[in-house]
Each structure stands twice: as structure tokens, then as C-alpha cells.
Amino acid sequence: MPESDRPDLAAGVPQEAFAPGQMIEGTYAGERVLLARVEDGFYAIGGVCTHYGAPLCEGLLSGRTVLCPWHHARFDLESGRATAPPALSGLQRYQVIVESGRVRILGPASPPRPSARPARGPDSVVIVGAGAAGAIAAETLREEGFQGRVTLLEGEPSGPVDRPNLSKDYLAGNAPEEWIPLRSDEFYRERGIELRVGTRVERIDPKARTLTLAGGEELGWGALLLATGATPIRLPLPGAHLGHVFTLRSLRDARALIDAAGRTRRAVVVGASFIGLEVAASLRARKLDVHVVAPEAIPMERVLGRDLGLFIRELHEKNGVRFHLGSTLQAIDRDHVTLSDGARIDAELVVVGIGVRPSTELAEAAGIACDRGVLVDEMLRTSAPVVWAAGDIARWPDPSSGERVRIEHWALAQRLGQVAARNILGAEERFRSVPFFWSRHYDVSIQHVGSAAGWEHADSVGDPRHGQGTVILRKGGRTLGVATVGDPRASLEAELALEGGDAAAIVEWERRLRAAA
């Protein structure tokens, strides 16, 4: 909304201007503010998501919770707190008054009181891995009032970073590096979180409640959270370990790739996954010639369905990417790659994006139950006492699909970390979040909610091939997931419907979607 169209909420707006369940964006003292009406009155909080700056008025109001339209973060209207990632910080809340038929803001409200000290909990918590799950778990422990020792161990030389941005704006050259850290060093110091980077854990001993670091140092713990993430899969091919062959997982990887991209003109991306195609788009932004090699006939068809897969392929082709589909790599040489059909492509830079493997080595060596990930229960506890797991390594019983799943999504890993932290403190909270991820290609964002592995039928509503539509992924008549392009509200509504687990609510959501198409 243009600034000139936003009402001044210090002067107020007519009470009858909007009904319960409605939101408007206004201003107060030059700041954008969201004013919402719910059944019991009016609430006002900051109007811009603290994650990437999305206008919250374009999101969705559910009870006293506002959902961000871009990446599905959630904020509580009463407190302003961020209640679901990827937003980490809360919003300013404002005092609202209704008088003489007008609703207006009196001024900023005081911050909400911090949580009381939990009644239960260990004397100390060690978190192995400072990615999405581990970093937010450390924060959550403090937000929940935990006052014991918190140690966050990370093998990489940098602290927690905004990993989704590494393959998007940061790699494309549109985001400076100061945007990449999730928090400052000062943030961790102020909260008494001991962040130790470049620190590799050699082994853990659940019975003794100790772990041993590289170099021999031993740490004890009252509770342990494993959030070791995943490791990129490398190609078992001749030339795969040459210096111009890269994977992208860490800030160190991204820096090396950016440096190499600045010295080359021709790149081959292996794999038409989200990471591979985001890298392709970012390298095109840097004016490199980009070829994508993948075995499938339509990129992302297995995940998003045929219509969205074709849209993605055509979008990249319009932006200059050349595809070699139905092919795999046979060998990598210093200045070219050879495909399975014998074709050669000149390449000064090769980026491999063919998936990751969960980093379960520590858990397996400690005798913790693993099967394609670390097995956890609904509370994210492992088979070992006082050991939890979260993020890309965790395989948990998913209520929406009825199966045990392990899913590699950033926001989901954060939500797993939140719940694990609360359960370490005795909350006994079942993990119920619906998986969500987003992917950005040039100026187009794709959103996906649900756990849709093994879907059988993909029904399109609208026209996804023209950048405006929804794909509903089903198995046995049951809706497992929803993918959208150009319709963030449909994605939010689908998330809420799937989260409730009510088949009738999902059918009603689809009815409204088709009626609006």
C-alpha cells in the first residue's frame, strides 16, 4: 500500500470501517502499524514482518495470530511475540483505544513480561549444531526462562547464518554479507548462550552425559540436543574433487562459490532440485552462462507436479538457462564436463546440488536408534534418555501424513528446534507443525505446505504455468500437500487447513479456492 494511502492511526479510523477478523495497515509516528479487529476488541502491532519485511496486512489473521504472507512466520497480536519461525524477533505493540466511534493508537505499549523460570528442567543444556534447529533452540531455552548453562557448538567457523539466503540473494549479489548472520555475537553474550564455533564433537556418551570435542576436551550436560544437520552428497565420478567443483551448504561454501563465479563465465549445475535451480538463477544474475544437467524430464515434477515443473523450466529458459534433461554426468575435467550421452559442455565452474545426507554419525556411534535419520518420538526425544534431536536429522511421526518423516526445510527445522527446547524443559509438547518451504527463482516465489512425498495425483487450480495458481497433491483421495505460485493467501489458508487435520476443513478450503479461481 502506498504510504499516502495509509491512515494515521494516531488520529484514528472509524470503528465501523472494518469487521471482526479484518486487518488494515496504517502509520503511527512514521512507523507502519497493523491494526486488527478480533471478537474481543482491537490490537495493534508493527506492520512489517521481522524476517524479510513482508507487509503483514497481506497475510492472514487466525484468532489472535497473524501469519506472514511470504514465509509463514506467525506473530501474537497481544504480545507482539514471534511465535513461529522463520521470524525470530517480535514486533512493537501499541495501546489502542476506542472512543467516539473511532479506533486510534495512544502510543507504544511496554514490552511483554519475560517468561518465569520453568518449574522443571536440567541444570545445563548442550546443543550440537548451530543451524536452523540448534540456534533457535538456544534462544527458546532463554525465552522460556531457563537459567542454566546453555552451550551451542558449531563445527563451521561462522555462527548461525540465514542459510536459505546463501543460494538466493547473497549468491546473486543482491544481499550484503552483514545480512547473513542470524544474530550478532553480542546477542548470544547478552543471553548467556555460550556459542563455540569451529568446534567439532568427536563422540557423545549418553550414559555418562558427556561429550568429547576434537582435541580431547570433555563437556558434561544435563540434557543434549542433536541438531547436526545434513551433508551435501558428492558425485562419485572422475574429477568430482577438482578445485572448481562446489557444493553449497555453509557460508564458507557460498563465499568460495562467489569468489569462483567472479573469475569464470561458464557454469554447469548438476541437479534440478530447489538448491540447484536457485543457484542457476543466482549465477545468471551474475551474467554467467549456465547449463543445468538432471536425469528427470521435467524439473521438480516429483515434488510440485507437472504444471509447476513446466512453469519452472520455462521460467529458467526465459532467463537464459540451458537444460540437459534426461542426462547425468559421466566425468568432470578442468574445462568441461562429459554427459552420459557423450555430449561435452564447457565448464569453468561446476556446482553439485543433488541432495544431502543426514549427519547421524555421532548418534549412531553412541548407540542411538537411527534409520535414515535419528528416530524421535512426538516430543522429539531419541531412544537415549535426556537426548533430543531436531532439524534435518530428525525422523518423527508426522500426524498429517500418518508416516514417520524426515524433511529438510529451513522453517520446519526451526520449529522442530523450538519444540525440542520446550520439551527439554518438561513441556511434553507434541510436534504438530505442517511442513512449509519456499523457493525463489528470479522474481517468482513458490510456496509449499504439507508432507506430500509419494503423492499420486496433482490437481491444478488456476494456471500455475502462467505464474498464478495452486497445485493440490493427493494420495488415495487425501490431500497431502499444496504448492502455490502467485497466491500467498491460498498457501496460508492451506497450511491452517492441513494443520487442523480436519478433512472437512480441507474440502471447504478447496471449494473456496476453486470458487475464487
Image (cartoon, rainbow, N blue to C red):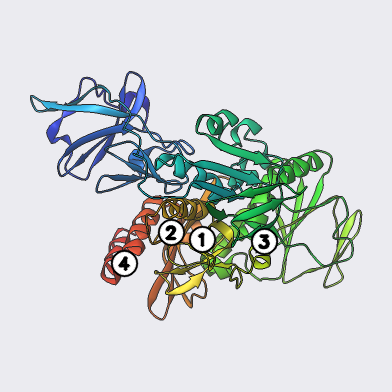
Q: Amino acid at mark 4?
A: Ile
Q: Nearer the viewer, residue 149 or 420?
A: 149
Of labels 4 and 1, the one closer to you? 4
Q: Report which quarter residue 38 is drawn in.
A: top left
Q: Are marks 1 and 2 in contact (CB under 8 Å)?
A: yes
Of labels 4 and 3, the one closer to you? 3
For residue 362, the mark is 3
Residue 174, visible in the rendered structure:
yes
Above or below, comparing residue 164 to residue 472 in the picture: above
For residue 506, the mark is 4
Label 3 sits on a secondary structure element that is helix
Q: Are marks 4 and 1 in contact (CB under 8 Å)?
A: no
Horizontal arrangement in the rendering, residue 140 relative to residue 189 (left or right) = left
Q: Amino acid at mark 2?
A: Gly
Image x and y of residue 386, in percent: 50, 59
Question: Image quadrant for the C terminus?
Answer: bottom left
Of labels 4 and 2, the one closer to you? 4
Residue position for label 1: 465
Q: Are marks 2 and 3 in contact (CB under 8 Å)?
A: no
State the residue at coordinates (67%, 61%).
362
Q: Are marks 1 and 3 in contact (CB under 8 Å)?
A: no
Residue position for label 2: 469
Q: Name which of mark 2 and mark 3 comes first in the sequence.
A: 3
Q: Name which of mark 4 and mark 3 comes first in the sequence.
A: 3
Q: Amino acid at mark 3?
A: Leu
The answer for how far apart the CA atoms under marks 4 and 2 are is 17 Å
Q: Amino acid at mark 1?
A: Arg
